[in-house]
Image (cartoon, rainbow, N blue to C red):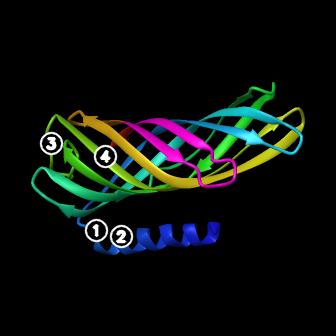
Amino acid sequence: MKFRIFSIMVLCFLFNTANAQSYMRGIGSNISILTAKVNTPSEQYDFAMVVTHFSFTPRFTISEGENNSVSICFPLGVGVGILSSANGASGIAWGADAPVAIDYNIGNMSTPDNEKGFGWYFGAGFGYMYSGYSSDGEVTNINTYGPIGRLGIRFGSNYHTTVGLFYKQGLEKDKYKTFGFNVLLER
């Protein structure tokens, strides 16, 4: 299943690179908060983990208008963070995030030539996050994947700033919910 998702993301990237009207990119960071109600044979507890990612976001427009566009983006991220859970576990967390999303963009940075002072976007896609944590000498790995919804605003003139929110509902057994916030500088 993981290999299929990864293969689809790579094929979308290659297809859109060949046919994209414009290429834009952003660099910045995001904060992801994973939550779940974990049920194991021995216990049941609420789980929460915060991971801060360094993020690189390539974006390819599929269709462009004068003040809007439809784009495919890959907000890739890697980073570290902290773990806390209701059962008392705490420790160091890490993660790698590999989503793909289709966005509708209006105004600022909807196209490389659009220099309006303000813009916004919204979109949907699919994401996969590999993360893990170390607590009390034990290492635990988490794989979560599912549909993503995202929205944000863009502003600025020389360096365009993007501030966005995203949500992913996990489809795996523990149904991890991921809430996130990101800030990017785009060119």
- The structure residue drawn at horizontal position 77% and vertical position 42%, both measured from the top left corner, is 39
**Looking at the picture, how far across and down is residue 24, in whole percent?**
31, 54
- Amino acid type at circle 2 is Thr
Q: Which residue is under mark 3?
A: 115
- The structure residue drawn at horizontal position 46% and vertical position 50%, both measured from the top left corner, is 148
**Looking at the picture, how far across and down is residue 178, in whole percent?**
55, 41
Report whether 32 appears left or right of 64.
Answer: right
- The structure residue drawn at horizontal position 15% and vertical position 42%, both measured from the top left corner, is 115
Pair 4/3: label in front: 4
* Quadrant (top left, top right, bottom left, bottom right) of the N terminus: bottom right
Give the quarter of the image for residue 64: bottom left
Q: Residues within 10 Å of mark 2 (few under 14, many from 20)?
A: some
- Vertical comparison of 120 with 16: above or below: above
- Amino acid type at circle 3 is Glu
Q: Which residue is under mark 1?
A: 20
Q: Nearer the viewer, residue 21 or 174?
A: 174
Q: Residues within 10 Å of mark 3 (few under 14, many from 20)?
A: some
Give the quarter of the image for residue 157: top left
Q: Is residue 17 visible?
A: yes
Q: Which residue is under mark 2?
A: 17
Q: Verify CB contact (< 8 Å) between mark 4 and mark 3.
A: no
Start-end of magenta stretch: 164-183
Mark before the other along the chain sequence, 3 or 1: 1
Q: What secondary structure is the magenta-colored segment mainly?
A: strand
Q: CA distance from mark 1 to mark 4?
A: 19 Å
- The structure residue drawn at horizontal position 63% and vertical position 47%, both measured from the top left corner, is 175
